[in-house]
Amino acid sequence: MGKALETKELVKWYGKEVLALNKVTFDIDAGDFFVIVGPSGCGKSTLLKIIAGILDYDSGKLYINGVDMKGVPSYKRDVSMMLEMYALFPHMNVFDNVAFGLRMLGKDKSEIEKEVKEALRLVGLAGLEKRMPLELSGGQRQRVALARALVINPSVLLLDEPLSHVDYRLQRKLMEDLKEIHRKVGNTFILTTHVQEHALSLADTVMVMNTGVIEQIGKPEEVYTTPATVFAARFVGEINLFSAQIKSWDGGLCYLTTDIGELKANPKNKNTLPSSGKVAYAIRPEYVKIGEEARLCDNKTEAKLVSYYYFGHYMEYVFEAIGNTKIKVSVPTEKVGNLTLGSTYLLGWSAKDVLLIERPCMIEGLNIEEVIYGK
Amino acid sequence: MSTLQLKMGLTDRVAKYSRYLLLLPGFVLLLLFLLIPLSMIVGISFFERFTVTGPENLTLKNYVAFFTSPQTPVILLNTFGMSLLACLIAFLLGYPMAYFLVFRVKSARVRFFVVSLLLVPFLIDWSVRVVAWLPILGESGIINYALMSWGVIKEPLELLFGRSALLIIWPQTYLLWMIFPSYLALTRIDPDIINAAKVLKAPPHRVFFDITFKLSLPGVVMGFIFVFVSALGDYVTPALWAGGIQTLGLSVANYAANFVWPYAAALSTILVAIALLILYVLLKVVDIKKLVY
């Protein structure tokens, strides 16, 4: 399979102060649904705008379908983009908004009519051709923007935070639609989001970004189960992180000193870990057991229940162990027992479910504790 | 309960109508100094004479006289043609400046500085500015002097005392009226709308004509109206520098100066009517309602 996109050490400065992209190198397979996830200000929007050609980069290389894009203006790239705030043309109705790109490509009238109709049907807006953008709801505007970007059938479609400015129901609907449309049209989709759930559920490949650098690229389950850095672990999914010191190794088992006492780990990545030194000790909330079940685990600690969050299909409990260390535990709703706030319970988890992460993040010079506990 | 209802009704009504109070001062001003005098002018135009005792003899004579005069086509063409041409020149000079300021000048401070420079001529008294054209455009003025000493021309150009004077002086004088609304309209355009056009395969000239220019049209139309109306109302420049070409405004001034009130009133009415008609057509053609989103 060919590469839809390749970048080599892309660098982008805003003025002299802000380094938006710091030697970003990655590639994307043709036909991939590629999701870039990261906090706001991490450079994901900048990256999309550079790919689209509406922003220039300072150094490095950018190839789309193998062609160097240096100096290639936006309208000559085989790319289209749905901008974050939709940016519909306010003086054109829905039909003309969607038809704009086709007209620019010089397609003839009957063809334009057919393709616009098809695109509007695909996004569920058939019949609204004559409406002006101001007469549309937020969700409808978003769909016009999507149809407008899709209709010119680019080999790479860029979607900048398409899920950010609509309510939850519309988000879900659009996620389903995006997946289905991607399957149907088969183009390469590159989507940015700051919401990790969107990244995990939409992507074929996830790229986690952190102020101008790539933290990790991989399949969603890879990033979730084997985060490359503490930052990636924290950003994708909930996780309990403790600062830990490796004491010794015994076969595959690692013994560590942490804030909540001596703990064991039997991590999958043991071959890449050092024999001593500081690491992050990580356990996902769904692997932590409470009460009777915890008794059988090889890691145990007592902790006081301080709060809980009900999410419908699961419950998240927050416990406080020694030294005010918070431990989150998530339990499927049907398994929720009767716990009382303020009471102390035994928590436990298996050493094989523990992750040990050596690298705090891809930005140089940061202390692992700073990243574990947030700056 | 009924008292409560009454009270609520009263406050509601007060709340509903009190905002119209905001319009009151402006409305009174317009009524006193525009609508009443204008109606008087229109009224007087239908009389044969206007003396100290009041108007005499209701008639259409003034209008008939104007529209049957052989001079009329020339006067109309001078008046509206020159004003519209001045608008066009002001647009061709001013719009690129506004565009440059908005899209090419990154620093807000530089922008502010340039806009302030545009205001400098307005610090000079109007009468001085009118007279100052002689040493600039006159036979031995700066421009002719420079062009002749560089050998570009042998004989001095007749820049003053002809129609060309109006096409230099009006656009220069009213340039700011064109730049400012255009500038404001351009700053209102979301840069992402322009980016959207770019990623939707629009080459630069289509981005400009289909998006940027169209979205700035309300400002451009405003600029046109400002310059057009200002030029129409100016009879001093034609009188001083246009070498005796007749415009409606100038005729009004002449007849009024000789106390031929009814005929001057009829000319004023025609001036206002045609001006309104032109503005109406302009707004229709541009379909401004669609653009003021």
Image (cartoon, coloured by chain):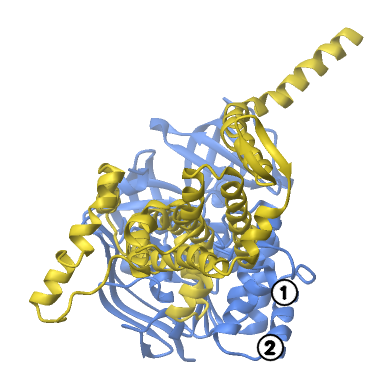
Chain colours: A blue, B yellow
Quadrant assignment for the N terminus of chain B: top right
Check disc 1 and report the residue beneath it: A120
Q: Position of residue A11 (x, y in %)?
A: 27, 70
Q: Residue at x 32, y 83 (%)?
A: A71
Distance, label 2 to label 1, CA atoms, is: 16 Å
Mark 2 and mark 1 in contact? Answer it, CB < 8 Å.
no
Of the residues shown, which amino acid type is indicated by label 2? Lys
List x then y, in percent, for residue B292: 60, 56
Closer to the camera in the image, B122 or A344? B122
Q: Residues within 10 Å of mark 2 (few under 14, many from 20)?
A: few
Frontmost of labels 2 and 1 is: 2
Residue B2 visible in image: yes
- The residue at the point 49 percent across, 91 percent down is A1
Q: Residue at x 50, y 33 (%)?
A: A303
Q: Which residue is mark 2?
A: A109
**First in sequence: mark 2 or mark 1?**
2
